[in-house]
Structure formats: C-alpha cells, structure tokens
C-alpha cells in the first residue's frame, strides 16, 4: 500500500526513481557543457584582450629601448641619460628633480616616461 506522503518522501531521497536513458544523460551533459562554455567565453575573451594589450605594450617599450640604445653617448648625455638608465627611463621609474637641486632650492620630484601612456 502506497500513500502520497510515502511516495513523495521516497522521491526526495532518490528511491524508486526510474533510471535515465543514455540519450537523456547525453542531452543533459551537452546542455551543461554549453552552459559552461557560455560562461567561460567572456573570460577567455578578456584574457586574450589582456594578452594582446601586454604584447603591444612590450613591443612599444622594446622599440623605445632600441631607439635609445641606438643613440651615441653624446646624444644620451644631451637628454640626461646614461646607457644604464635606459631601461628605467623606458619603464617610467627614473626620478629627476624638476628644479636645480642646491641648498637654495627645494626640488620637486617628477617621473620621466619616454613611452607614451597609450602605448604602455
């Protein structure tokens, strides 16, 4: 004798459930896979955009470094750099006083960047 309460309770715990056919299992697996791919696609696209952005930045910095290393020492001295300062100048980590630094002036610090912001 089966009552509705017993059948509902048995269904809740997974008893007496008809097994799924292989077709139903495959359809559910395809649905779940499509859902996972749909959720992953925007993240993958953002990753690819980020990768290309970093690649373009690296190329711009390499081009700037190649141009600076191509200058002779006199030209580098004219712009206030030594060969050892070129990587820091391209990376934007060289600090120079804005004014002459002597005991009579208080110089402010500025960052000198040799690569345009949009390229990096």
Image (cartoon, rainbow, N blue to C red):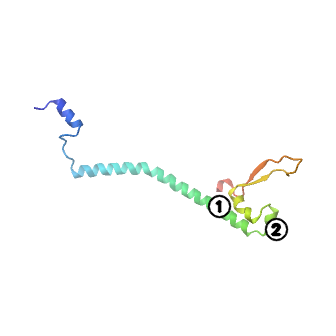
- Give the residue pinned by disc 2: 74
Mark 1 or mark 2: name the one nearer the start of the chain.
1
> At 80% across and 66% down in the image, what residue appears?
75
Q: Position of residue 111 (x, y in %)?
A: 74, 52
> At 85% across and 51% down in the image, what residue appears?
101
> At 74% across and 65% down in the image, what residue appears?
83
Q: Position of residue 112 (x, y in %)?
A: 74, 54
Total numbered circles: 2
Measure the alpha-carbon separation of dots 1 and 2. 24 Å
| Secondary element type, mark 1 | helix
| Secondary element type, mark 2 | helix
Please tell me whether residue 5 is drawn above or below residue 53 in the rendered image.
above
**The C terminus - image quarter:** bottom right
Q: Which numbered mark, 1 or 2, is in the foreground of this view?
A: 2
- Give the residue pinned by disc 1: 60
Tell me if 48 is positioned left or right of 110 in this view.
Answer: left
In which image quadrant can residue 13 be found?
top left
In which image quadrant can residue 89 be found?
bottom right
Tell me if 22 is positioned left or right of 40 in this view.
Answer: left
How crowded pointer 1 is (Cα within 10 Å; few <14, some 14-19, many 20+) is rated as: some
The label shown at residue 116 is: none
């Amino acid at each position: 004798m089966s009552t509705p309460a017993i059948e509902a309770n048995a269904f809740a715990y997974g008893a007496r459930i008809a097994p799924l056919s292989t077709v139903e299992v495959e359809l559910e697996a395809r649905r779940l896979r499509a859902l996972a791919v749909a959720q992953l696609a925007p993240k993958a696209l953002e990753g690819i955009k980020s990768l290309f952005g970093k690649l373009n930045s690296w190329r711009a910095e390499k081009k700037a470094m190649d141009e600076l290393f191509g200058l002779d020492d006199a030209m580098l001295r004219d712009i206030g750099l030594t060969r050892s300062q070129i990587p820091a100048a391209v990376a934007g980590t060289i600090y120079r006083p804005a004014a002459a630094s002597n005991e009579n002036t208080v110089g402010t610090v500025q960052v000198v960047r040799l690569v345009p912001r949009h390229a990096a």
